[in-house]
Amino acid sequence: MTGSNDLTSLTVTELAAMLASGRVSAVEITDACLDRIGHYNDALHAFIDVYAEEAHAAAKAADLARGAGYALGPLHGIPFGLKDLVDIEGKITTGGSKVWANRISPATGSLVRRLIASGMIIAGKTHTVEFAFGSWGTNQHMGAPRNPWDMREPRTPGGSSSGSGVAVASRMVPWAVGTDTGGSVRTPSALNGITGLKTTVGQIATDGILPLSTTLDTPGPLARSAADAAVLFEAMRGGSAASMEAILSGSAPRDIKGLRLARLPDAELDCVEPAVLAAYEQSLAQLAEMGAEIVSIALPFRFADFGTLTGGLIAAEGYSFIKEIIDDPAAPVDEDVRARFAVARTMSVTDYLRLMRERETICAKATAALAGVDALLTPTTPMTAHPLATAEREKILPSHFTRMANFVGRCALAVPNGFSPTGLPTSLQIICAPNDESMALRIGRGYQAVTDWHRRAPALEDAV
């Protein structure tokens, strides 16, 4: 049998093939993940709660079912991490807030039921920014996960799906569930050197997920590769075992020859750190070499504008859910998070409706500007992971390039595309039309077929 260290380094695509052939058991995979969580979680703070006993029992049941010929599908027996924003009946869901430290979930969300129905095993809940409102990944009261790519100085994990990003990057689990309202799947994917898919609103059910913005909230997968992200996306939206088998078989299209891919106007790149910019240009060159046409287009907006637009919409809708908590000065709320809701206190109904009308106008303009291309390519974040101690004082946020896709209703994929001279990951964002996740994943899979950035892993010898 394969050793535990080898098992935690494998992708889901590889693990599913080994399970199907009987070369490995669900118990071996799950115990390897639990052992790694136990070894590194104190240092990295990815998981807020670990369901070791339940996970081990579920793995034993998976092996018995497979042995009897009753496999639920190709993912039966593979563990995952779940953002602590998603309800499991009877379990605590804090939403990253000390205020909800003892909040018992009343029911299990649809997406969790779908993943369980596919045979997947919940390893535990992963940390999040409080109320999922923040892109650096900090959390004053519940603690911030630590980016595993620098074990000398604590660095930002990206938010708000911070724990999910760290858990996947550090090989505690092969993949995890996150949510994305302004970049919260893509930002931790970028800063941790993994792959993350921001799905189109409506593709995956959001019941049982603590809301931030009902207009923008989207669950999505964080994984080691675009292929793994594709199969988890299929499971999250309730796809059949046959459709997951098809993705795992590698039959999905990866050829990008002839696709028209738009680059950012030069004026949009002024805020990008040199290492990130160099990786971006190299990615464009690589895609052109693969046969894609890289084109320049005019955009009817500046990415910086979406800070106010998206931030205002999130604040207004989020405030409507937790007004009493935010307005209570005695409530133990992260002060950086409380400040992000401040704009909502003075926003009138007229202001909110005006913002929604402005959104419709910008969506129409974006659709027209991007009609002739298959994807818009940007750096996922303008920077690599910054020190945790100073991040919240930075003027440029990691969500600088991600918020646009949320505001105009597009899907987007973040894929690793290099490293800085100091060894920190960089990332490429692939923004596609609404409900065209297959195109984003096609481009991502094509890119990863000729690059190996997504196969790199952080060295954690100094983590304990």
Image (cartoon, grey):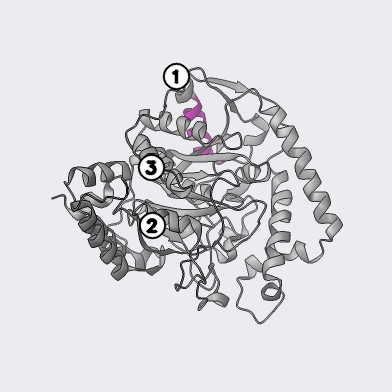
Q: CA distance from mark 2 to mark 1?
A: 41 Å
Residue marked by disc 2: 116
Q: Position of residue 344 (x, y in %)?
A: 76, 63
Q: Secondary structure at mark 2?
A: helix
Q: CA distance from mark 2 to mark 3?
A: 17 Å
- First in sequence, mark 1 or 3: give its number: 3
Residue 289 shows in this picture: yes
- First in sequence, mark 2 or 3: give its number: 2
Vertical order, 410 against 252 (above or below)? below
Span highlighted in magenta in the image = 272-284
For label 3, the crowd category at 10 Å Cα-Cα, with few meaning under 14, some 14 to 19 and many 20 or more, is many
Residue type beneath disc 2:
Ile
Residue marked by disc 1: 289
Q: Secondary structure at mark 3?
A: helix
Q: Residue at x 63, y 79 (%)?
A: 331
Q: Position of residue 402 (x, y in %)?
A: 60, 44
Vertical order, 406 against 369 (above or below)? below
- Based on the displayed image, in which of its 4 quarters is residue 115 positioned? bottom left
Q: Residue at x 46, y 30 (%)?
A: 442
Vertical order, 74 against 159 (above or below)? above
